[in-house]
Image (spheres, rainbow, N blue to C red):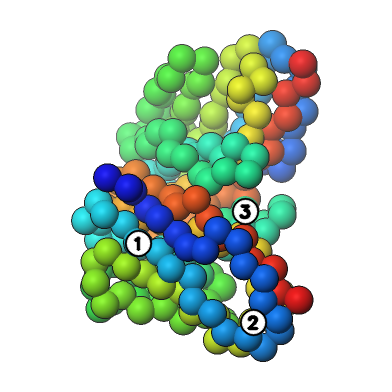
Amino acid sequence: GQQVMQIPQYQHVQEGEDFTTYCNSSTTLSNIQWYKQRPGGHPVFLIQLVKSGEVKKQKRLTFQFGEAKKNSSLHITATQTTDVGTYFCASSGSARQLTFGSGTQLTVLP
Amino acid sequence: NAGVTQTPKFQVLKTGQSMTLQCAQDMNHEYMSWYRQDPGMGLRLIHYSVGAGITDQGEVPNGYNVSRSTTEDFPLRLLSAAPSQTSVYFCASRKTKETQYFGPGTRLLVL
């Protein structure tokens, strides 16, 4: 599988502040997927990016895939307490294995 | 559709015991995988399967066996449990490069 590094590992923000997590690879990624895992729950698919430079939005969430397809980011505008959880990026280079980043654990302080 | 189901939800084992974690999906997905999740380690792939009768090792396969006799089922066997296998185990399924669906997880404690 394709290796992806994710930063930061932890992020604490005040409610209303913005949040960004980054996913980086030393090799070109064929695609990037993002998942959210609520505390005590299981990962849930958010989105998939495939094209170079692709940007997708889901309400307050903005997902980007770098021009070189080696990095991706997830940005949350004006965080809410419902955004709490761990966000993972993942990539399936050969389509056989889906490799996950180590995740960013987001805490939102009310 | 029930999606991906896992049993049991919780399990306590003694060192050296064996057990099987069950996983089933009713979405006719070709790909199924087992991950373990440990604090700060993200999701690490144990074994995966791209179809009935085909399995392969992931990142951390030692101490685990799998089989895929049907499209629906993908059990994970712990041969001789060790405290290092204390973790949360997730089964997942998908079609090729599409969305991966996770089961609710099995929390395993090995004493």
Q: Secondary structure at mark 3?
A: strand
Tell me where residue A107 appears, x and y as whole percent.
73, 29
> What is the chain letter for disc 1?
B
Q: CA distance from mark 2 to mark 1?
A: 22 Å
Q: Is residue B101 above or below residue B45?
A: above
- The C terminus of chain B lies in which quarter of the figure? bottom right
First along the sequence among labels 1 and 3: 1
Tell me where residue A63 appears, x and y as whole percent.
47, 27
Of the residues tagged 1 and 3, which is closer to the observer? Answer: 1
| Residue carrying label 1 | B24
Q: Secondary structure at mark 1?
A: strand
Please tell me the numbered disc located at residue B81.
Answer: 2
Tell me where residue B53 appears, x and y as whole percent.
25, 78
Q: Amino acid at mark 3?
A: Gly
| Residue carrying label 3 | B42
Residue displayed at 56% across by 73% down? B60
Tell me where residue B54 appears, x and y as whole percent.
28, 76
